[in-house]
Amino acid sequence: MQKYLNPRNDVAFKRIFGTEKNKDILITLLNEVLKNQFHKKIIEVTFLNTFQDPERKASKQSVVDIMCEDEDECKYIIEMQVAEKGGFESRAQYYASRAFVSQMKRGGLYEDLKEVIFLAFTDYEIFPKKKEYKSEHVTLDKKTHENDLDKLSFTFVDLVKFERGCSKNLSELNLEEKFYYFLRNADDINKEDLKSLIGKDEIIDRAFEELNEFNWDEEEIRKYEDEEKGRKDNEAALDFAQKKGVEKGRQEGRQEGRQEGIEIGEKKGIEIGEKKGIEKLIVSMRKNGASVDFIKKTTGLLEKDIEQILKKVGEKA
């Protein structure tokens, strides 16, 4: 029986989209996802070094998942972001800026710098307040909405929102949507759904074949499993830290509440303490980059209640 591995795994993602033998899969993906961006259809790509070396030893080195350029030397950075981490949006701009600046050679001309497009797939809600699962960001003039500064652009695809909002049958999905479904569900798909999803799209069939465990050798499986173990360890550590943080916040809140409870009654004081503990926890999580959706899952509170708390203490929701 066929077993498909997790395409969001860093090793698997690079195998599917970041190798010479599968460059046609990457080209198809880029043409489907970026068809509304400011460039013509991609015919060919050349893979580039994913290590963006800093100019100075003290500078921070950046490593991206996949980086390539098309026949016009337009640069593409492709990232799969599984874990929610504070500052990813800033990191995206840093990566794109590094790729843009690194083009300039001694004696070169600014007008020769080529466009850089950053594309990220996220396995969490990167922009919780946005309704659409796909967001495209370019620099526009505030008054005329003209794209005069057209060298950097960013596209984010929220796979969680895509899955939640997709009401089509698998056979009705267009090719772009099939890629999103593949990235989100390939490792948990059944035989009938697989058949419906592939349909007549051979490129999707090829992508699944790259995920077929049967086609991986022992060393490749070892690297894949090491990556999976690292991801699960990080998730477990984060979960433990969150639980400890929740309990610590509640304990601190109870203590404060008990002090106030001297005047208004012990029971009432403990209730106030619980409330203050949760408020402290929410503010701390938000300052550390947690999204409102993530805070909802952690605390069990409604989004409106969380936003009220953040507004009350002057934090941006």
Image (tube, rainbow, N blue to C red):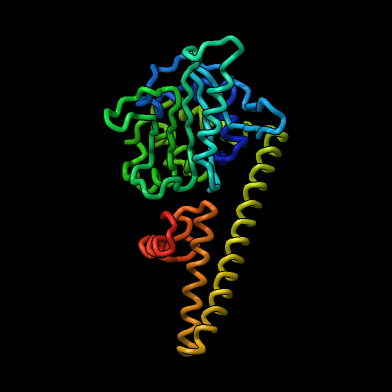
Q: Is residue 30 left or right of residue 235?
A: left
Q: Is residue 294 left or right of residue 54?
A: left
Q: Residue furthest top?
A: 107
| Figure check: 107 above or below 182 | above
What residue do we see at 50% from left, 24% from top?
76
Q: Position of residue 62 (x, y in %)?
A: 62, 32
| Figure check: 146 above or below 220 | above
What residue do we see at 27% from left, 31% from top?
143
Q: Quadrant of the N terminus?
A: top right
Q: Quadrant of the C terminus?
A: bottom left
Nearer to me, 296 or 148? 148
- Say how many tags the image has: 0
Q: Is residue 166 left or right of residue 283?
A: left
Nearer to me, 117 or 14? 117
Answer with the quarter of the image where residue 40 lies.
Answer: top left
Can residue 264 be seen here? The reply is yes
Can residue 1 be seen here? The reply is no
What residue do we see at 42% from left, 54% from top?
316
Q: Position of residue 285 (x, y in %)?
A: 52, 58
Answer with the quarter of the image where residue 12 lies.
Answer: top right
Q: Position of residue 215 (x, y in %)?
A: 62, 31
Nearer to me, 182 or 79? 79
Nearer to me, 274 or 69? 274
What residue do we see at 52% from left, 18% from top?
69
Q: Position of residue 155 (x, y in %)?
A: 43, 33
| Figure check: 16 above or below 112 | below
Q: Residue furthest left?
A: 144
